[in-house]
């Protein structure tokens, strides 16, 4: 008998039962537990409630309470799938918007569930493509504990919901089971990501490349590709059809002039898209990529940004050298590069970086899987430990830092109670201001005031008070004399100045008196009484 035959592994004997490998399930459970703790611990107290969190929760409130997509004029600034999901979540909770204390906390509870589910999807995607459990653990560990990730993924953001659908689509493609229904499901997930937040368009080319290369050897590849694209486009076409039924797809007289904010007598989806495409970092509505990179993002987490960017470039180069990993490595790199292109070209808010966190984590996992493809799993696990332990224990890393007294302490995300100031602000309003008062507020407390009994019907966001005719002309008439109180959120004055909301600034500076104020670190909130309100 030849040596080759002797070396060939023997099939199991008839009736023998092979024990399943429990290691992936145990490791996956550990990764999900880490995500649950890292994102759940202190999430109702840190970070500070964000304006956009309040916007999405007030739109979810409008869906449930008014059967409308927004309590104000819906002008198609974002597709509605995100707050439709939020409204569905709130609808099944016994306490509604106050199930977890207040509306934003309730939304953050859903973000925690979404994150833990995304950990599962990322782990399985990297493991199935690379065959490496240490690579999957590395990707999810970075995704779980990145300070940048913890900061933004706790917040109620459309970006987090968008990335959940993208990760679910990637997981379905990673199964490679050759079924048409799987390709359709993956395509539908990408379609849902597009109607959650339109930025997913820049990630779509990498996803399409992955699909075409993954199923090109299948006999039903033509059906798979066709049904994938059909499923991607179905939610998008439904959104366009919704706008057309309301006669809000095109602007009046097809006027796409950017000289005015709302040409014609109605809003328009395509006009808003046209306006969004022409936004840049010089506009008053956003900041530049370089400014946010140096002023915010690198400060929060330089390790992920530098390591993720390097892994993306290296994956793009090295992925071409391995036939088995070429397609997923190039696809993940293209997805990250596509979204990076968007960040470099658009007017930005600081949380726009949120989708890059899972994309960089995917590239780190894929590149590590390629780098250790000839290394034993135990050796790869040791290498992962050598990479992660210093980042965890060194001051200024993922978990600990030096305070002003030179003492080690946990990072802000796990100990600072910032949102209590906003809760105190709402409590003071309800105890001291009548519900008939006309208030200019920020969106972070909108649901807390409008979902109370009785509601503060005349509490409106500052940007609506200056831009929405129904509020500007019918409630406040662009005059300080029609304002009773201005409820100042953190850095709201900067937003007033950037937006040119001069008459509100005049009301505060020339006719206002501060009646409540609270400060902690660089967070400052206040309530200003305007004029001679009784």
Image (tube, helix red, strand yellow):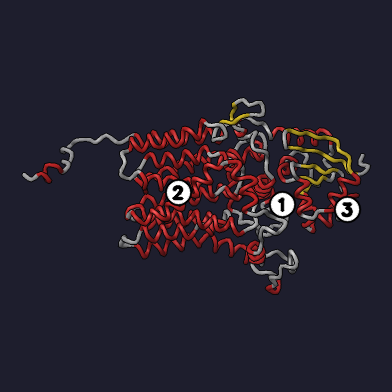
- How packed mark 1 is, by other alpha carbons closer than 10 Å (few <14, some 14-19, many 20 or more), is some
Query: Which comes before the other along the chain, label 2 or label 3?
Result: 2
Residue found 46% across the figure and 40% down from its top? 140
Q: Which mark is residue 479?
A: 3
Q: Could you tell me which secondary element the residue under label 3 belongs to?
A: loop
Q: What residue does disc 1 label? A: 71
Q: In 3D space, how far apart are the residues under numbered discs 1 and 3 (Cα atoms)?
A: 23 Å
State the separation of the CA atoms marked 2 and 1: 40 Å
Residue at x-position 49% and y-position 40%: 142
Q: Is residue 378 visible?
A: yes
Q: In this view, does 84 lie above or below 245?
A: above
Residue located at (76% from left, 53% from top): 498
Q: Which corner quadrant holds the C terminus? A: top right
> For the residue labelled by badge 2, is the local secondary structure a helix, a strand or a loop?
helix
Residue 381 position by quadrant: top left
- Circle 3 crowding by C-alpha within 10 Å: few under 14, some 14–19, many from 20: some
Mark 2 is surrounded, within 10 Å at the Cα level, by few (under 14), some (14 to 19) or many (20 or more) other residues, namely: many
User: In the visual, does 22 lie left or right of 475?
Assistant: left
* Outermost residue, right side: 532
Q: Reply above or below: 367 against 23.
A: below
Q: Where is residue 409 in the image (x, y as percent from the top left)?
A: 60, 27
Residue closest to the far left:
1
Q: How many labels does the image show?
A: 3
Whole-percent x, y for residue 134 in the image: 38, 39
Quadrant where the image shows the N terminus: top left
Q: Dot 2 corresponds to which residue?
A: 363
SS state under label 1 = loop
Of label 2 and label 1, which has the lower sequence position? Answer: 1
């Amino acid at each position: 008998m030849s040596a080759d035959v002797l070396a060939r592994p023997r099939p199991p004997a008839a009736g023998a039962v092979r024990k399943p490998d429990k290691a992936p399930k145990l490791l996956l459970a550990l990764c999900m537990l880490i995500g649950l703790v890292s994102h759940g611990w202190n999430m109702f107290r840190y970070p500070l409630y964000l304006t956009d969190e309040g916007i999405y929760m007030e739109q979810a409130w409008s869906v449930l309470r008014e059967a409308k997509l927004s309590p104000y004029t819906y002008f198609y600034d974002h597709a509605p799938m995100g707050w439709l999901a939020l409204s569905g979540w709130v609808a099944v909770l016994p306490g509604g918007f106050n199930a977890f204390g207040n509306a934003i906390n309730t939304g953050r509870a859903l973000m925690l569930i979404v994150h833990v589910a995304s950990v599962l999807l990322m782990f399985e995607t990297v493991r199935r493509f690379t065959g490496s459990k240490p690579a999957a653990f590395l990707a999810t560990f970075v995704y779980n504990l990145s300070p940048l990730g913890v900061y933004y993924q706790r917040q109620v953001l459309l970006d987090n919901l968008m990335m959940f659908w993208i990760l679910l689509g990637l997981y379905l493609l990673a199964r490679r089971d050759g079924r048409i229904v799987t390709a359709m499901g993956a395509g539908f997930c990408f379609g849902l990501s597009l109607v959650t937040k339109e930025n997913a368009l820049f990630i779509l080319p990498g996803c399409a490349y992955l699909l075409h290369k993954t199923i090109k050897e299948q006999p039903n590849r033509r059906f798979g590709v066709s049904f994938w694209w059909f499923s991607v486009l179905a939610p998008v076409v439904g959104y366009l059809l919704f706008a057309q039924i309301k006669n809000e797809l095109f602007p009046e007289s097809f006027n796409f002039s950017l000289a005015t904010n709302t040409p014609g007598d109605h809003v328009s989806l395509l006009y808003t898209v046209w306006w969004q495409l022409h936004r840049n970092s010089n506009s008053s509505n956003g900041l530049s990529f370089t400014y946010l990179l140096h002023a915010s993002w690198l400060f929060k987490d330089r390790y992920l940004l530098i390591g993720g960017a390097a892994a993306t470039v290296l994956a793009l180069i090295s992925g071409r050298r391995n036939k088995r990993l070429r397609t997923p490595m190039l696809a993940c790199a293209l997805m990250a590069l596509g979204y990076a292109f968007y960040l470099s070209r658009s007017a930005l808010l600081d949380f726009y970086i949120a989708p890059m966190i899972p994309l960089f984590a995917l590239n780190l996992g894929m590149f590590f899987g390629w780098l250790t493809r000839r290394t034993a799993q135990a050796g790869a696990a040791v290498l992962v430990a050598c990479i992660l332990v210093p980042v965890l224990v060194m001051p200024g890393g993922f978990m600990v830092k030096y305070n002003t007294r030179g003492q080690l302490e946990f990072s802000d995300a796990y100990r600072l109670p910032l949102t209590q100031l906003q809760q105190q602000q709402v409590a003071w309003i309800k105890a001291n201001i009548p519900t008939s008062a006309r208030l200019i507020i920020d969106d972070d407390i909108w649901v807390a005031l409008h979902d109370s009994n009785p509601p503060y019907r005349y509490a409106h966001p500052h940007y609506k008070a200056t831009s929405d005719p129904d509020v500007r002309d019918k409630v406040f008439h662009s005059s300080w004399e029609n304002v009773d109180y201005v409820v100042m959120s953190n850095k709201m004055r900067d937003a007033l100045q950037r937006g040119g909301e001069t008459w509100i600034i005049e009301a505060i500076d020339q006719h206002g008196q501060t009646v409540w104020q609270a400060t902690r670190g660089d967070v400052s909130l206040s309530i200003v009484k305007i004029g001679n309100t009784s």
